[in-house]
Image: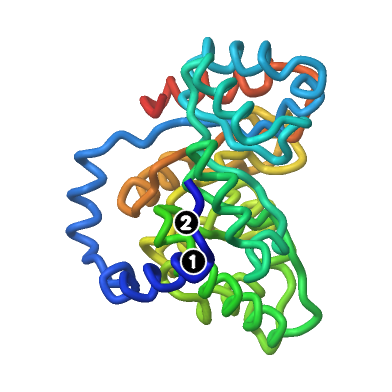
């Protein structure tokens, strides 16, 4: 099915008023109790295996107990081929890391069309930078406009952090704060918990600072490290996972997405991560 950019924009403008209506903390908590946050994995974690054998890697991921996968590149496959591989293995696409240029007005309709075929609802930009605060404010407007269009197609637009968004500041405010202060409430935050903690910040405090935006949350341990949730180098303080889970579950989080940067040539790191989530009753 094809949609014109004008149709997306018209539908998005019509729905904006109700789409950005605030939710009370009490309502969010009630919803959290009623739903089960699903668990996926970012395929960047096993990218070398995906290059060699994408179908086999997806099969192994499903057998571990993951419900979905997030892509960061498509390994030469088109949208229909991706959807078929997911269906064959009983998985869903719980996100994609897509470059900032793909959500610009001239490219967004094509991006949405591709993801309508794959069944993906989450368009997450995995990194960008600007030389000053105004650059981040400009990014916030770009994302806000894209989020309206994506909403009309049943999709979300969001941003995934590394460490510089919290370490670098302009006039005392970090990039993350500048961006989300100026972005529409429709713009999701895909918080990479490990990077937030590694930057010396508290992920729970930031989730509460910008509530009802955390549709997908990257479950990563501090970086660098062994690459398995709950395991940290000797003498290091890791992520306080129980606190993070409680904050995510009081928000609008729909997916915990595991990411491990330790070794892209093995399944063992992501196996250890889902085993940890199972031990915590989250998978």
Spot occupied by residue 166 in the image (x, y as percentages of width and height) = 66, 67
Please report whichever mark, 2 or 1, sits nearer to the chain's N-terminal start.
1
Q: How is the image coloured?
A: rainbow
As measured in the structure, the alpha-carbon distance from the residue carrying label 2 to the one carrying label 1 is 6 Å
Tell me whether the residue at label 2 lies in contact with that at label 1, contact meaning CB atoms closer than 8 angstroms.
Answer: yes
Q: Splitting the image into 4 quarters, where does residue 164 fall?
A: bottom right
Q: Residues within 10 Å of mark 2 (few under 14, many from 20)?
A: many
Q: Which residue is mark 2?
A: 156
**SS at mark 2 in the image:** strand
Q: Residues within 10 Å of mark 1 (few under 14, many from 20)?
A: many
Q: Nearer the viewer, residue 203 or 104?
A: 104
Residue at (74%, 35%) from the top-left corner? 261
Q: Nearer the viewer, residue 74 or 70?
A: 74
Q: How many marks?
A: 2
Tell me: 135 left or right of 243.
Answer: right
Spot occupied by residue 168 in the image (x, y as percentages of width and height) = 74, 73
Residue at (68%, 89%) from the top-left corner? 171
Spot occupied by residue 130 in the image (x, y as percentages of width and height) = 77, 76
Tell me: 63 left or right of 105.
Answer: left
Q: Is residue 128 visible from the viewing direction of this image?
A: yes
Spot occupied by residue 107 in the image (x, y as percentages of width and height) = 67, 62
Q: Which residue is mark 1?
A: 147
Tell me: 95 left or right of 234.
Answer: left
From what the image shows, is residue 252 above or below residue 245? below
**SS at mark 1 in the image:** helix
From what the image shows, is residue 131 above or below residue 207? below
Residue at (68%, 34%) from the top-left corner? 78
Residue 7: numbered disc: none
């Amino acid at each position: 099915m094809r949609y014109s950019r004008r149709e997306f924009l018209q539908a998005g403008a019509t729905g904006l008023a109700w789409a950005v209506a605030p939710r009370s903390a009490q309502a969010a908590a009630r919803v959290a109790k009623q739903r089960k946050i699903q668990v996926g994995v970012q395929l960047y974690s096993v990218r070398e295996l995906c290059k060699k054998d994408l179908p086999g890697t997806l099969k192994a991921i499903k057998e571990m107990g993951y419900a979905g996968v997030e892509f960061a590149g498509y390994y030469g496959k088109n949208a229909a081929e991706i959807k078929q591989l997911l269906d064959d293995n009983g998985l869903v696409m719980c996100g994609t890391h897509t470059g900032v240029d793909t959500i610009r007005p001239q490219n967004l309709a094509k991006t949405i069309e591709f993801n309508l075929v794959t069944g993906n609802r989450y368009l997450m930009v995995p990194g960008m930078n600007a030389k000053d605060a105004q650059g981040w404010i400009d990014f916030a407007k770009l994302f806000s406009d894209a989020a309206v269009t994506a909403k009309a197609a049943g999709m979300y637009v969001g941003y995934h952090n590394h460490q510089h968004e919290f370490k670098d500041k302009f006039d005392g405010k970090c990039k993350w704060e500048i961006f989300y202060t100026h972005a529409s409430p429709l713009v999701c935050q895909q918080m990479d918990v490990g990077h937030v903690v590694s930057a010396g910040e508290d992920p729970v405090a930031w989730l509460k600072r910008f509530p009802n935006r955390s549709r997908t949350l990257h479950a990563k341990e501090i970086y660098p490290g062994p690459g398995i949730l709950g395991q940290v180098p000797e003498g290091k303080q890791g992520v306080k996972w129980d606190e993070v889970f409680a904050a995510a579950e009081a928000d609008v989080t729909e997916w915990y997405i595991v990411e491990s940067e330790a070794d892209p040539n093995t399944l063992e790191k992501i196996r250890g991560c889902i085993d940890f989530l199972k031990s915590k009753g989250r998978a």
